[in-house]
Amino acid sequence: MAGIGFELKKLFKKRSILSNFAGMIYSTFATIGHMLLIIVVLFVINFVMKIKGFPYNDKEIFSAIVLYAFIFSLLFSSGIAMVVSRYIADKMFKEQFEDILPCMYGTIALNVLICGIIGIIFYSFSPLSLVTNIAGFLLYMQLGVIFIIMVFVSAIKEYKYISYSFLVGCAVIVALVIICSNIKALWNVQFLVIAMDIGFFIIMVGIFISIKKFFTIRSNNYFDFLKYFQKYWKLFLINSLYTFGLYSHNFVMWIFSDMKTVSANIFHYAAEYDMATFVGMLTILPVTVMFVVRTETNFYDFYKEYLYCVRNSTLSHIEKARKDMIKCLGSELVFLIEIQFIISLFLIVIGIPAFQTFGLSWITIDIFPFLAGGYYFSFLMFVIMTVLIYFQNYNDTIKVSLSFVVLNIIFSYITIRLGPEFYGLGMIAAGLVCLVSAIERIIYSLNHINTVVFCSQSLVQNFNKTRFEKIIDFIDR
């Protein structure tokens, strides 16, 4: 995502009100656009349902379809996206742009195959109508494709067209929902999900066209990126574990808590807890943009200078560059910790009365501050994990992300046993413990970075291809 940050910094450096506003809009859509779309759409749909008297059971089924489509498409695509992101970065560094578009086609094919099989199995057990099942399946598949192609946004740098795609898609969904609400025959679950499908299809096609226009030449290396799964399988594991960790506490609630609900015999969820999770995650969206626009890009400049000194300068210059890099990283982390604390505290203070106005239950309102705190710690942990990945410290990053999953499950189960007043504290405990662990690992890595960098340089390059690489080359002929 650093590529987004470099482009956006050009906008902010112009110092004009218009350029700053454009920078904020582009950065928002480029980094968290899909999240904002879901937020806007769901709030509008829930509002329309409320004033138009949508049946309660149908509302629960619709919410479950959207919830499952979002969570599980993200879970199954996050690991793939991480490895592909590394592949794109390497290809852009080598200026082998002809391999990027085929990579997108191949990645979409892989994601559709994996997610499609899982989705078909899941919906084969659904008692809902065929149309509703197909619409829910398409929503889940489209979200997975969008999560994948958003990885390529850094490469094209056409954030204006990406923003337009999100805005048009969002507007179409809202318009279709309003139309359905005024036609009795269309005011049901299946047509609401179809409206979501149409909107997300517009977004998906808009991003796809933007990427395709940027890359006018392409190779036949459609599955060349699969070689990176052999080399960087740890990246796949890191992002998959972290994403699973973000929702593992929800899964525990779906299975063991008294809040669990089952709709249509296949959708297990805890509506009030899931809503608290949803609004809790909103508190980290602003600082996510700041991380991409400022922290990651500022750190990368010093990191790049340090690597240059390692290759070309004396020990004194290397040590100076290392200290400058540590100083930059420390100041940026302190900035994120402080600004996110202020944002989270502010949103908790204003959020509680606002949620009362919107009619959220007291259970959701009581859980929200705990989950906001949990996502505060987990986001800071993610930032440090990102830096560890820069240093290619994959083993420690895997340990932190795996600990996050395990502890979140254990602590969340403990809170269930303690009672509803403790719900959400498991996320705080898991996030805090893993944050401390990540900080300890980054301090160790920074103190030994010279050794790590020097020892990671291979003196002899191995040009022999593995059997798997030969198979991929044969497929791409």
Image (cartoon, grey):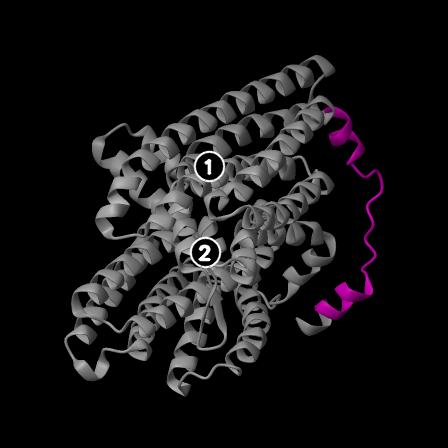
Residue 420 in magenta stretch: no
On screen, 406 above or below 210? above
User: Which residue is pictured at 31% across the width and 68% down the height?
Assistant: 199
Q: Residue 331, percent across and down?
A: 50, 20
Q: Residue 476, percent across and down?
A: 66, 71
Q: Residues within 10 Å of mark 1 (few under 14, many from 20)?
A: many
Q: Residues within 10 Å of mark 2 (few under 14, many from 20)?
A: many
Q: Nearer the viewer, mark 1 or mark 2?
A: 1
Residue extending farthest bottom: 130
Of mark 1 and mark 2, the one earlier in the sequence is 2
Mark linked to residue 373: 1
* Residue 81 located left or right of residue 187: right
Mark linked to residue 10: none
* Residue 477 located left or right of residue 352: right
Q: Is residue 145 visible?
A: no
Residue extending farthest left: 182
**Which of the 4 image quarters holds residue 382?**
top right
The magenta region covers 450-472
Q: Are marks 1 and 2 in contact (CB under 8 Å)?
A: no
Secondary structure beneath dot 2 equals: helix
Q: What's the residue type where badge 2 is placed?
A: Met
Secondary structure beneath dot 1 equals: helix
Q: Is residue 130 visible?
A: yes
On screen, 443 above or below 410? above
The residue under label 2 is 150
429 and 167: which is toward the camera: 429
Quadrant in the picture for the C terminus = bottom right
User: Which residue is pictured at 23% across the width and 70% down the height?
Assistant: 177
